[in-house]
Every structure is written in C-alpha cells, then in structure tokens.
Image (cartoon, grey):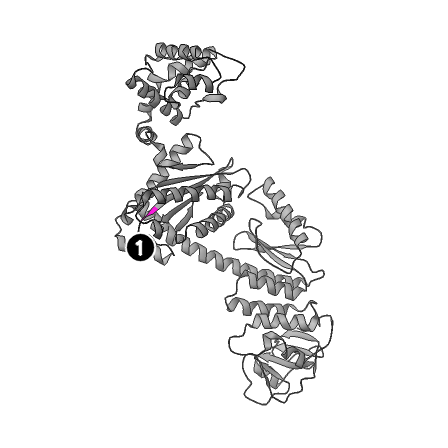
C-alpha cells in the first residue's frame, strides 16, 4: 500500500518544525543532523519498506530511521534508535501528547491541507490511548481536515467544536430544532439527509444505533480520513457511555435499596454515597423529577433521558454540590445533602430545595418539545438512615400532584396536607373514597350538569376564601345574595351545611376526594363570566 502525497502548501525545514511549541523540548539525533532538509508531507509508519513521496516525515519507531524507505527524510518517535540512523530522528520528550504534536506538524507543513488516513489514525489513536476526550478528538479532526469540526450527540446537542464558523453551527442548530419538533425520538436522520450549506455531516454509529454525528466544513476531505475521525468519536462515545452506565448502576442500586426499605447502616450509606461524589452524612431532601409527554415512548428514550439529566445536573451541580442523582424509567431521583451552613435549620433547607426545584423547572422546560417536567420534594430528613422515607415522601407528593393536575409545577410533601391521608385511602381502598365522594359532592355535580349551575365552583371558592361571603361574591363577580342562595341549595342537595364546622369539613374533604378521583373542580374566574350570573 502506498501513500498518496498530500497537496503541498509551503516548504518547511526540519528546523522550522523544531521551533513549534509542541516540539520545544524534543531532541534531534544525531545532534549535528542537517536541519535544513525540506519536509513536504507527513505519513504514518508503514513498516519502513515502502516508498514515500520525496520529503516525507514518518511517524514511526526508531528502527525506521535506521533503514528508512525512499522519500523519507526524517522520522519522529518517542525514543532513540540505539544505533546509527540514516535520517534525522526527532525524539519526543517524556509525556508529550503525540496527537497534538502530529496535528501541529501537519498544520505547519501543509497549511491546513488534507493528508492521509494513516496520519489521522495515528494521531487519533495516540489521543485515545492518552485518555483524551471528545474535545481533543474534535480539535485533531479540525487540524487533520484543514477546516472546522464539531460533534453532536444522539439528540443533536453539540458536545464539542473546534475552528468551526458560528453561522455554520447556527444553521445546524436550526435544522436540529426543526427535526426535534417533528420527531423528538429521531432527530439526526433529517439533519444527516440535508446538511446546511458549507457543512458535511456524517453519522457516528454505536453498537446498536447512531450515537452522534460529525460536522466538517472542509471541502474534498478524503473519506478514509473522515472514517478515522468518526471511528475515534465512536470509541469515545462508547467509553463515556460505559462510564456513565457504571456510575448509574451504582447510584441506582443505592437508591433502590433505600426506597425498598432495606436495612443499611448509616456508615454504609455515607461510604457508598461518597464513592459516588455525594455527602449524605447530615441527611438530605428527597427530590423526584418526572417527564410527561403525549407519547410515553419519548419519556423512556435513553437519548431524551440523558439530555434531561444533563440539563438537570448542570443546575444541581452548581446550586447543590455533592448531591446523589440517578435517572431511571423517565424519572430523576435525587438526594440533596444538607448544606453545611444549614445543618441545624430544617426549614431553611426545605426553602432552599424549593428554590432549586423552581430553577430545575426553568432550566429543563425546553428540554424536549411538548414535554412537561414536574418536580416533587420531601421534607428535610436529618437522619441518614431514613433517607428512603424522604424519597417515599417525594414520590407521594408527586403522585398527588399528578392526580391534581399539577404537571409542570413544583409539589412539596408539606403542601399536600390532608390529601396525603385521602390518597392512602384511594391507593388501598379506592371504592371507599368513591363512596365518600358520592355521599358529599356527587349530588352537587349532578345538579350542575343538569341545570348548568355552578354550585361546586361556588363551594370550592367559598371554602378556599375561609368562608368569607363578600370575598367569594367578589371573586365570582356575582351578588352576595346569589352566593347565599347557592350555599343554601348545597345544604338541601348534600344535606351538609357550610355553617356547621363538621359539615364544612366533610364538604372540604369531598372536594379533595373529587380531585383525587380525577374530576375537575373549577373555581373563581374560570367558573363565572363577569357579565353573567347563572344561579
């Protein structure tokens, strides 16, 4: 296999290369080697027995410098040959990043022109072995192609970019947003099918599905070079995915054990949480965030979940460090450690957690078009061994909030009040809750439906305003005598008088039962029109 020489942009001498910052501490063997030799191309080591274009610098082992192929005028390696060399040998210093050195040399020699797949493979392999992430791969991709380079994840978010014009990325962003609006679960195919002007977009395959896309702006890049960059990106995606999955399993196992009520000692919980970067030594607040969409499959799509979790983690890491956060089945479960400055102030912790929840809603509101995010909070729990109960409280608050139509809001355990007692009845004995509703509110609902009146709405508003007749009339834009008439009618139909404390409590519980059963209760301006009084 022979290497096609890249286009020559300008002649560089060996001395020019040695002046690059990336080669500042490199040595040349022999020390009196001719540094004026012209370098016109860079190629990967092909074993030292194949002809090269004249003026080629090889990336190879020291042995290549002993018996170089025709056309090779210098060799770069990590150590010396241990023998006389036929061409100058550039020896990299210990710890040098070979990928960056290669990219810098290519840029200097070729002025950004394209080069062989072998050079790209060598540079990217060195980067991956050295533990470089997708950011370094993107930079090498830009250097290797002589243009801009960016990498998108499976949901179309930019994970890294280098030397790529803002207008190109803006065009890609617009296409991604359009694709999300059409199908949140299949974002990349439309973008891959019709890339914006000035960009080439190539899919990055995973083990099962497409995991991302590569965006390039240089024209005429060899497909083999592009494949090398794509493969390196795929390796990094797989490596990062494995790391995330491993951490997620560990977090999930701990949280599942806490929720299941398994007996775990305080010291064990603290130790396991610290291994995951969380500090639960002084208790925590339980938080559950859930996604809802018309298509349930969107919620459990791994790409959607990771995108939501990424946005949520950015807020939590900034506002509430050392929290334990997990994602499972369309739900985010988190334990927010007691802040060190509020260890003895439970109410202060709850207030701060509520503020965090509001910021989470704001930050994740547009994560996926057409999807709502609801966040539920427990009370602050100082006892580490009772953190499973904190997550149970958050789960109960979430279930009640969903039954009450509180999607897209923050729901706290404290505000559920008597709803949590009724919800337990509803969960264990739903027929009993239905029977209670039938004996209290059902006659009023039937009357409203038959005569187009607003007895239930008037009752709800009256009770919400603590029995203030004037305030109720003002809120409903009606006369006080009309409100009084409706209250009397309620007493006749339900056999319960709002003037009696026991009856008033039954009616209040009846309204709560009605809401938990999924029946709408309208109050205030939603019930009455200012210009009409339907008594």
Whether 180 is among the magenta residues is: no
Name the quarter where the N terminus is drawn: bottom right
From this view, report whether residue 459 is shown above or below residue 77.
Answer: above
Give the residue displayed 73% in from the left and 76% down from the top. Answer: 11
**Chain part drawn in magenta:** 280-284
Circle 1 crowding by C-alpha within 10 Å: few under 14, some 14–19, many from 20: some
Would you say the magenta stretch is mainly helix, strand or loop? loop
From this view, report whether residue 398 is shown above or below residue 102.
Answer: above
Return the residue at label 1. 270
From this view, report whether residue 461 is shown above or below residue 377.
Answer: above
Give the residue displayed 50% in from the left and 40% down from the top. Answer: 297
Q: Secondary structure at mark 1?
A: helix
Residue 214 % position (x, y): 61, 56
Residue 163 % position (x, y): 64, 60
Front position in the image: 397 or 296: 397
Residue at the front extreme? 470
Residue 101 % position (x, y): 59, 73
Whether 283 is among the magenta residues is: yes
- Give left or right: position of 36 versus 414: right
- Give left or right: position of 302 versus 74: left
- Give left or right: position of 441 versus 137: left
Classify residue 65 by image quadrant: bottom right
């Amino acid at each position: 296999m022979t290497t096609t020489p890249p286009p020559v942009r300008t002649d560089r001498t060996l001395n020019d290369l040695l002046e690059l910052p990336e080669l500042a501490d490199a040595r040349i063997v022999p020390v009196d080697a001719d540094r004026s030799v012209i370098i016109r191309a860079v190629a990967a080591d092909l074993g030292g027995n194949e002809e090269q274009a004249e003026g080629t610098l090889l990336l190879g082992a020291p042995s290549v410098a002993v018996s170089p192929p025709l056309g090779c005028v210098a060799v770069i390696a990590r150590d010396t040959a241990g023998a006389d060399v036929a061409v100058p040998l550039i020896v990299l210093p210990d710890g040098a990043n070979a990928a960056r050195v290669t990219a810098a040399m290519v840029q200097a020699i070729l002025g950004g022109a394209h080069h062989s797949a072998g050079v790209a493979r060598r540079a990217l392999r060195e980067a991956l072995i050295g533990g470089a992430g997708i950011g370094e791969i993107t930079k090498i991709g830009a250097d290797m192609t002589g243009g801009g380079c960016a990498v998108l994840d499976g949901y179309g978010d930019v994970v890294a970019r280098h030397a790529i014009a803002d207008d190109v990325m803006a065009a890609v962003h617009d296409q991604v947003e359009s694709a999300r609006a059409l199908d949140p679960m299949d974002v990349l195919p439309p973008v891959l099918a019709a890339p914006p002007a000035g960009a080439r977009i190539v899919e990055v395959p995973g083990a099962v599905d497409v995991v991302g896309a590569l965006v390039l702006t240089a024209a005429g890049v060899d497909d083999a070079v592009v494949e090398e960059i794509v493969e390196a990106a795929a390796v990094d995606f797989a490596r990062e995915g494995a790391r995330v999955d491993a951490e997620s399993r560990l977090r999930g196992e701990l949280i599942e054990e806490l929720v299941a009520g398994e007996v775990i000692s305080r010291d064990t919980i603290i130790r396991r949480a610290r291994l995951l970067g969380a500090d639960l030594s002084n208790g925590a607040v339980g938080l559950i965030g859930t996604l809802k969409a018309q298509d349930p499959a969107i919620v459990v799509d791994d790409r959607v979940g990771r995108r939501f979790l990424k946005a949520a983690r950015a807020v939590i890491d900034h506002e509430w460090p050392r929290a334990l956060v997990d994602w499972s089945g369309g739900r985010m479960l988190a334990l927010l450690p007691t802040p060190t400055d509020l260890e003895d102030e439970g109410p202060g912790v709850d207030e701060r957690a509520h503020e965090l929840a509001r910021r989470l809603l704001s930050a994740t509101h547009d994560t996926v078009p057409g999807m709502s995010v609801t966040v539920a909070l427990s009370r602050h729990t100082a006892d580490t061994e009772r953190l499973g109960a904190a997550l149970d409280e958050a789960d109960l608050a979430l279930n009640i909030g969903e039954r009450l139509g509180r999607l897209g809001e923050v729901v706290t355990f404290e505000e559920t009040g008597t709803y949590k007692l009724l919800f337990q009845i509803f969960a264990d004995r739903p027929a009993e809750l239905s029977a209670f509703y039938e004996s209290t509110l059902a006659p009023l609902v039937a009357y409203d439906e038959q005569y187009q009146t607003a007895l239930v709405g008037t009752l709800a508003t009256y009770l919400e305003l603590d029995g203030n007749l004037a305030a109720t009339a003002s809120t409903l834009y009606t006369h006080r005598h009309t409100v009084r008439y409706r209250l009397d009618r309620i007493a006749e139909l339900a056999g319960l008088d709002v003037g009696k404390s026991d009856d008033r409590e039954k009616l209040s519980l009846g309204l709560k039962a009605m809401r938990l059963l999924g029946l709408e209760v309208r109050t205030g301006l939603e019930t009455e029109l200012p210009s009409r009084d339907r008594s």
